[in-house]
Image (cartoon, rainbow, N blue to C red):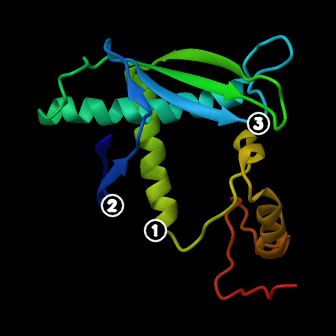
C-alpha cells in the first residue's frame, strides 16, 4: 500500500506498508505471530495493543484510499474502511496455538489523526532535537532501557529549562558516562 501525506514544510511524504491479505469484501487483514497473548486471562484484548494495530491497519486503508483517488486501485476487492488483525499466540514448547481476531472500522477522523501524526513525525525527523516522548507505546519497544539511559544522560537540566517548559541547550554537549 503506497500513499502520500502532504507535509507542507517538507513536500509530500511517501508512505509504504504491506498487509498480509485483503478479503474479497475489501477487509484488510494483518497476521501477527506472538509468543504472548495480546489479551488477558478473560480473553479481553489489551486496549493499547488494539490501538497500535488499528492505526497500522488504517495506514493500509489510507494506501487503498489514495489509490482510489489516483485511479489505480486494484479492482479485485472494493475499498471498505475496515480491517482485521489475526493473532496467533504460541509459546515455545507449547502444545497448541491460540488464534484470535479483532475487527476494526476506520473513519475520516482516524485517517486525519494518522496523517497529522505523519506530519508531526516528519517535523521531529527533520528537527535538530529529538526529545523522548514516553507513553504506553514504550512497553512494546525493544530499546526501552537504552532510551531511559539516553534520556537520563541527555535531558536538559532544570537550569536549562525556560519558563515555558522548552529547553535552551544550545552548545551544551553532555559527555557519555
Would you name the residue on which mark 2 appears? Answer: 9
- Residue visible at 77% across and 27% down in the picture: 37
- Residue visible at 19% across and 30% down in the picture: 73
Is disc 1 placed on a helix, strand or loop? helix
Image spot of residue 177 (x, y percent): 88, 85
Would you name the residue on which mark 1 appears? Answer: 126
The answer to which quarter of the image holds residue 154 is bottom right
Q: Which mark is residue 35?
A: 3
Residues at marks 1 and 2 touching, judged by CB atoms closer than 8 Å: yes
- In this rendering, the label closer to the viewer, 3 or 2: 3
- Residue visible at 28% across and 31% down in the picture: 64
Query: Distance from label 1 to label 2 (Cα)?
Result: 10 Å
Q: Is residue 43 above or below residue 85?
A: above
Image spot of residue 113 (x, y percent): 46, 34
Image spot of residue 84 (x, y percent): 50, 20
Evaluate whether residue 112 shows in this view: no
Is disc 2 placed on a helix, strand or loop? loop
Q: Position of 142 compared to 5: left or right? A: right
Amino acid at each position: 500500500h503506497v500513499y502520500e501525506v502532504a507535509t507542507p514544510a517538507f513536500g509530500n511524504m511517501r508512505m509504504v506498508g504491506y498487509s498480509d491479505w485483503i478479503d474479497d469484501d475489501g477487509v484488510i487483514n494483518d497476521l501477527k505471530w506472538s509468543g504472548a497473548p495480546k489479551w488477558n486471562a478473560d480473553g479481553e484484548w489489551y486496549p493499547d495493543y488494539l490501538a497500535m494495530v488499528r492505526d497500522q491497519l488504517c495506514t493500509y486503508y489510507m494506501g487503498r484510499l489514495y489509490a482510489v483517488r489516483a485511479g489505480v486501485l486494484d479492482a479485485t476487492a472494493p475499498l471498505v474502511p475496515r480491517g482485521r488483525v489475526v493473532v496467533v499466540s504460541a509459546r515455545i514448547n507449547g502444545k497448541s496455538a491460540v488464534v484470535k481476531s479483532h475487527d476494526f472500522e476506520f473513519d475520516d477522523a482516524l485517517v486525519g489523526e494518522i496523517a497529522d501524526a505523519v506530519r508531526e513525525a516528519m517535523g521531529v525527523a527533520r528537527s535538530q532535537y529529538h526529545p523522548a516522548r514516553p507513553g504506553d507505546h514504550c512497553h512494546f519497544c525493544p530499546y526501552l532501557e537504552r532510551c531511559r539511559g539516553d534520556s537520563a544522560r541527555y535531558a536538559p537540566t532544570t537550569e536549562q529549562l525556560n519558563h515555558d517548559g522548552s529547553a535552551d541547550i544550545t552548545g551544551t554537549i553532555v559527555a557519555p558516562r
